[in-house]
Amino acid sequence: MHIMEGFLPVAHAVGWTAVAAPFVVLGGRTLVRTLREHPEQRLALGAAGAFVFVLSALKLPSVTGSCSHPTGTGLGAMAFGPPAMAVLGTMVLLFQALLLAHGGLTTLGANVFSMAVAGPWVAWAVWRSSRRLGAASAVAVFLGAALGDLATYVVTAGQLALAFPDAQGGIAAAFAKFAGIFAVTQVPLAVAEGLLTVVVVNALTARGVITEVRA
């Protein structure tokens, strides 16, 4: 992912937009309330958005019509919650589609759901569960960022499989094919993103840009 412009059938593009839209609306309301109550967090939110923009712009060719790259959404999900990342991720994906020809407008809904909704919620859930089970902060941050990254690509593989089922094995076979190709590049990228996120969280915490993330 990002899935490129015009690659999905119209019905799928519209459907994924409809699925992603409520998360973005909820995220917008949450973000407005957060900034009203804590205006000092503007800098930290900007840093989280910049992290997503830079990492997700580093693309490698992968499945036809898509690509592999880090996502960067785990950082913001753990620091501000998944709803905030639905908005920040949508803004990043929109700018990348318009300015970098990375992704597209017709596939924006599908890309938002995989990268700005599913990935952040998995990252947050894994991080929170890990902390509650007693894992060290660095371990929880690593697991959240890495598995949130992988979740994005599992969802993207599912989106592509639904749109382009295998002639013989149907959706399941198509999913296995897409996920297997993504895994070649995405598993090492997810590990790298997890390690980088730990470093960035420690740096931002030390400088007071964000408070220590905790469950």
Image (cartoon, rainbow, N blue to C red):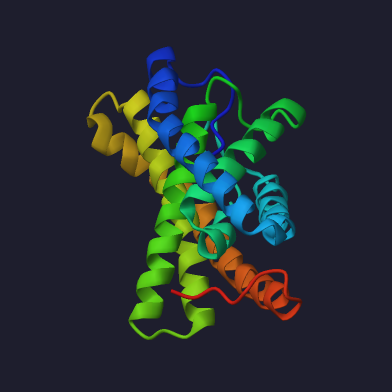
Residue 44 against residue 134 in the figure, above or below? above
Total numbered labels placed on residues in the image = 0
Q: Residue 105 sits in which quadrant?
A: top right
User: Horizontally, is 11 left or right of 65 in the view?
Assistant: left
Instruction: Please give the name of the residue rendered at 66% of the width and 78% of the height, measured from the top-left corner.
Output: 202
- Please state which of residues 11 and 46 is positioned toward the viewer in this rendering: 46
Q: Quadrant of the N terminus?
A: top right
Instruction: Please give the name of the residue rendered at 38% of the width and 15% of the height, measured from the top-left corner.
Output: 11
Q: Residue 94 sits in which quadrant?
A: top right
Provide residue 89's location: percent of width, then percent of height.
Answer: 59, 43
Asked if one can make out residue 21 in the rendered structure from this viewpoint, the answer is yes
- Please state which of residues 188 and 128 is positioned toward the viewer in this rendering: 128
Residue 211 against residue 13 in the figure, above or below? below
Residue with the most extreme top position: 10
Residue with the most extreme front position: 37
- Please state which of residues 140 and 171 is positioned toward the viewer in this rendering: 140
Q: Quadrant of the C terminus?
A: bottom left
User: Horizontally, is 205 left or right of 23 in the view?
Assistant: right
Asked if one can make out residue 183 in the rendered structure from this viewpoint, the answer is no
Instruction: Please give the name of the residue rendered at 51% of the width and 47% of the height, measured from the top-left corner.
Output: 30
Provide residue 4's location: percent of width, then percent of height.
Answer: 58, 27
Instruction: Please give the name of the residue rendered at 60% of the width and 56% of the height, measured from the top-left corner.
Output: 37
- Please state which of residues 30 and 112 is positioned toward the viewer in this rendering: 30
